Amino acid sequence: MFQRIMIANRGECAIRIQRSCRELGIETVAIFSEADSHALHVKKADQAVLIGPDPVKSYLNIHRLIDIALKTGCDAVHPGYGFLSENADFARKVTQAGLTYIGPGADAIDNMGNKTKARAAMVAAGIPITPGSESSLEDVDQALTIANQMGYPIMLKAAAGGGGRGIRRCDNDDELRENFMITGREAMAAFGSDELFMEKCIVDPRHIEFQILADSHGNVVHLFERDCSIQRRNQKLIELAPSNFLDDDLRQQMGEVAVRAAQAVNYVNAGTVEFLVDHNHNFYFMEMNTRLQVEHTITEAITGIDIVSEQIRIADGEVLGYGQSDISHRGFAIEFRINAEDPKNGFFPTPGQITRYHSAGGPGVRIDGCVYAGYEIPTYYDSMCAKLTVWGLTWPQAVRRALRALNEYDIRGIKTTLPLYRNIVASEAFSSGEFNTGFMEQHPELLDYKPYERREDIAAAVAAAIATHLGL
Ligand code: ADP
Ligand code: ADP
Ligand code: MG
């Protein structure tokens, strides 16, 4: 087994990986930029190395990261999510340096990382994909021809896109003409490629994805599904597992297709096969994420499997040691991405200092965070500052528990998505389980929330009013 792992990531993600390493008796090396010198992942690591002054580029400096891993005597590198986690060049160079990359092989990342390549691979494997253009679009005229053959609405997508960026719905020729330029430019800036393709827009679908695990001995299993339909701007906000939209038949069918998708590209390690499911329960392959995912915690909650430990064991060449029939799921889990964002202001980021931090606790509550009281959230990074995962034996219990935990959670000094989540979870729209990816647009009233008032706040307000009255 590995003795020391370098975690090529920061924040909540790096801390999550440290925890599994510690349980496995493996030391961790953290990396940090100057902006992150007070970050929690640095404080919690066995060793931490400053990678450079640039807040973002430092974490993407492949040469420097590999050099640190070698100098600190690491055996392996875990990329986490975001940053270099879907960069085939990084995976290749880590391996060439004699280190183990904890993730799929560079070829699988290459083949699945580009969405048009992935679609071609899935068609070859007989897997249903979202109807759309066969390959990348040459120019706007070709795009208009295909769109008119397929019929609007269509989704214009960047082949290299991720994190909800580089996706635009177009409802007619004019919108397509306009978005073609904008999306191409945006994709070039964000992903270094302006390759675009087109999919038929599935109106108000469910986003349902399957977690898979594959070892290097040819064993592939799935760990059931996650429903990630509650999104804003094509980015996930709340995820749940299992999905109450699937019956056992459809679950089994989709799980088998997800396993086949992984097998088709000789996939090894943890990965996620994302599908869109329409109102008639037709499902379409959308993309594969060749890495650990933010919402892996809900799968861990319902299956009891530690996905990060499994990633490490698989990378070490171990046999999975269990088959599909050994894996079961129990109860319902919900994850909330607590972001430093103001939902009432278009989810605009709200970095700043956290003045008070009390996390939730108690039965069925898990917190994966990276902030603390007094911590100044830097402006440079992803706005997610903690994840709350709750588990309940039944869906109603999970919902009640979620509301209880969200009410316990107290973060002050910055605006977060917490009050929005309290409102969502208390709504019939959410507790009914009847939602799709249009949820936030369909329920603008959920943005109309008030701050959560605690007894101590009311007492403080009364005391302040009395002080004012007495002229103190
Ligand atoms: P998930 O892992 O659940 O799909 P996200 O899509 O939000 O979650 O991606 C995980 C993290 O990686 C987020 O912090 C997101 O900003 C970042 N990310 C995802 N894809 C990319 C990409 N292609 N380039 C840069 N960052 C990305
Ligand atoms: P990313 O790589 O950014 O995660 P995805 O291809 O996974 O991009 O799509 C992200 C989200 O965008 C989906 O969860 C869904 O809400 C929406 N979306 C993408 N493609 C389509 C489509 N063809 N029809 C409808 N919605 C789509
Ligand atoms: Mg996706």
Image: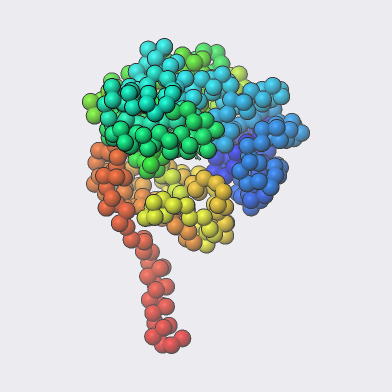
Q: What is the quadrant of the N terminus in the image?
A: top right
Residue most toward the front? 141
Of 43 and 233, nearer the camera is 233
- Does residue 449 show up? yes
Q: Is residue 221 depicted above or below 182 in this figure?
A: above
Pick the residue in front: 368 or 165. 165
Provide residue 73's location: percent of width, then percent of height. Answer: 74, 31
The extreme right residue here reads: 71
Q: Pick the residue in front: 29 or 339.
A: 339
> Is 69 left, or right, of 308 in this rendering?
right
Q: What residue sits 61% from the left and 34% below the top?
A: 21
Picture mark count: 0
Q: How is the image coloured?
A: rainbow
Residue 287: percent from left, percent from top: 42, 26
Q: Residue at x 57, y 48 (%)?
A: 380
Quick check: 378 left or right of 154?
right
What's the residue at 31%, 48% (across, down)?
A: 425
Q: Is residue 394 above or below residue 118?
A: below
Residue at the image point whose x is 49% and y is 48% from the top: 383
- Residue 68 in picture, x, y percent from top left: 72, 35
Side of 137 relative to 86 (left or right): left
In the rendering, at what x and y percent does residue 428 appear?
24, 46
Residue 176 lies in what quarter of the image?
top left
In the figure, 462 relative to 55: above or below? below
- Residue 273 in which image quadrant: top left
Residue sticking out furthest to the bottom: 471
Residue 332 appears in the rendering: no
